[in-house]
Amino acid sequence: MANLIEARGLKKRFARFELGGVDLVLPAGCILGLIGENGAGKSTTIGLLLGLLRRDGGEVRVLGEDPERAEPELHEEIGVVLDSCPFAETMSCRDVKRILAAGYASFDGARFDSLCGRFGLDARQKIREYSRGMRMKLSIAAALSHASRLLILDEPTSGLDPIVRDELLDILLEFIQDERRSVLISSHILSDLEKACDYISFIHAGRTVFTEEKDVLLDKYVLAKGSEGEIAALDPARVVGVRHGQFGCEALVERGYAGKLVCDRAGIEDIMLFYIRGDAK
Amino acid sequence: MKCLIIKDFLILRGQLKTLLLVAAIWFVISFINGSGLFFMALSVVFSMLLPMNTITSDEKSGFERFAAAMPLPRGALALSRYVVGAACSAVMSLAGIAAAVIIGDDPRETLISAALCFCSALCMLGVMLPLAYRLGVEKARIAMTVAFVVLFLAAALAASELGMEPGEGGAALAVLPLAAIVILAASMSVSLRIYAKKEF
């Protein structure tokens, strides 16, 4: 199975932030969710993958090419949704269609119209009259309307209602059905990623904490609940973090190492929160 | 580049009513003064104003970051605004000729003035765009105002040195097209270098 994205030790320095080593691998036919708090480096990583930023270190291959040195045609095969709608507020869907048709050789106007219809976007309405969710839908329609093998989406579900978010996830799953195409999606709505992703990559303070298959990750940890003493008795090497509450403690611990403590399923959100905010073991 | 030019004209279409209103007011003032040249000066103003408006719009919407992720050479991002600016100046120069004909200016003088205004507009465009790309629109506006005053004073000084009377643009007509070509070539080269290094 070919990898559509391979990144090792990606580094980028800014005045107030440093991406200190991000590793990503995205195989064909998969969806990779990029998670992390605000300012963790997700958008910087996406910028480096798209060749919008110049890296200070590391290696990256997107569709087999270095995005910094690749010909512009590489972008014909990448659909992009950035964190805000990139089109002027005075434009309409029809105007956006004209821009995209002139910009992408493989632009499919009928598919764009169909997606706009599916998302309930009026072709004549101005973008300034759209809600944030509608603007995001327009960006998604634009990204899905040309012959891309790879979709890179930076916070595409923010501002969308649950029904449209669910519909978007269905579209992403449809997109990878032929197992030649892949999706990289960053989102704060971790329940969405939990539904759709095959892999999860967690970035914290500019570094990759882990990249794991989602099912392996969800199977790997449990939330163990007990008293301070019970939690303290757990093997520290198997505990990711501990949260001290008013009525007891909660620890994210590797499955099989929680002893006889009461355990709940650990979701991706729990795992992320314990990695970021879990107290010292 | 075609897609960027279409995008810029679609942005300007959204401002069309305001731009037409400005042109109409300018025409009325020209008509009252009986000077088509005054209206033609608008082509110089518009050649700077309109590309700036498109850059401001792109900065606001984040279009440049999106465009950099499209299958477009970086050079196209830099050069498309020269095409748009030159096209706007050309249209405004033609409108200036029409206005001068209506006002009743001398046809020969009108054509010379239109050519001079067009070349001046290209010079201003050449000065302004690299500044806007490098400094951003707000700082570039200040630099542009200074450049406009300098260029105006330089033109007035040159005319005085050459012993030209107002309206006698023969010598300038020989110099300005050459200046426009040189300035534009240098400006495009600088803009291409700015975009080659630019991060989005």
Image (spheres, coloured by chain):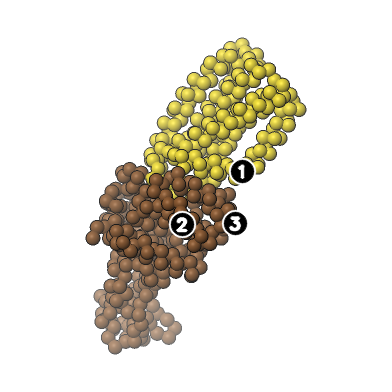
Residue A131 x, y percent position in the rendering: 56, 60
Are discs 2 and 3 less than 8 Å apart at CB? no
Viewer-nearest residue: A108 or B171:
A108
What percent of the width, then of the height, locates residue A159? 51, 64
Q: Are marks 3 and 1 on the same chain?
A: no
User: On residue A238, which mark appears?
Assistant: none
Spot the residue most to the front.
A110
The C terminus of chain A lies in quadrant: bottom left
Residue that sits furthest to the bottom in the current view: A260
Q: Is B167 on the left or on the right of A77, as rendered?
A: right
Between marks 3 and 1, how big is the CA–CA gap? 16 Å
Do marks 2 and 3 share a subunit?
Answer: yes
- Quickly name the residue at label 1: B15
Q: Residue at x 56, y 49 (%)?
A: A91
Dot 3 alpha-carbon crowd within 10 angstroms: few under 14, some 14 to 19, many 20 or more? few
Left or right of A156, for residue A179: left
Which amino acid type is shown beneath numbered disc 2? Ala
Q: Which mark is residue A141?
A: 2
